[in-house]
Amino acid sequence: MTRDHPPSRTLREANKAFKPAETKKPMTDYAKAEQSQRDNRERLKAERLAREAKGSRPR
């Protein structure tokens, strides 16, 4: 392939398909703590909503 010709569409698509996967940066201690706190808050919220829904049913 010469430099004066742009890459063909199939070559561009192949390059896109075989592009190296993006690697995630390891989480910092701060980010781990934040994620843990977020997960815990969501879990507690779900439990509270379930209790409220169960308690508000007519007998």
Image: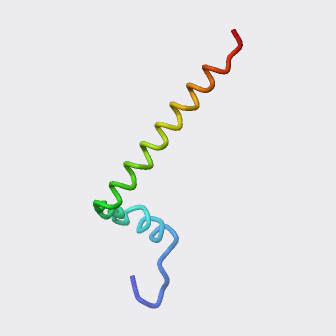
Residue 17: % across, % down: 42, 61
Q: Quadrant of the C terminus?
A: top right
Task: Return the residue nearer the eye: 17 or 4.
Answer: 17
Q: Is residue 47 left or right of residue 35?
A: right
Task: Return the residue nearer the eye: 10 or 50.
Answer: 50
Residue 29: % across, % down: 28, 60
**Residue at 53% of width from left, 34% of height from top?**
46
Residue 24: % across, % down: 33, 62
Residue 11 position (above or below residue 27): below
Q: Is residue 11 left or right of residue 54?
A: left
**Residue at 33% of width from left, 65% of height from top?**
20
Which residue in the rendered view is the most extreme toward the top?
Answer: 59
Task: Return the residue nearer the eye: 23 or 49.
Answer: 49
Residue 3 position (above or below residue 37): below
Q: Quadrant of the N terminus?
A: bottom left
Name which quarter of the figure residue 39 lies in: top left
Task: Return the residue nearer the eye: 27 or 34.
Answer: 34
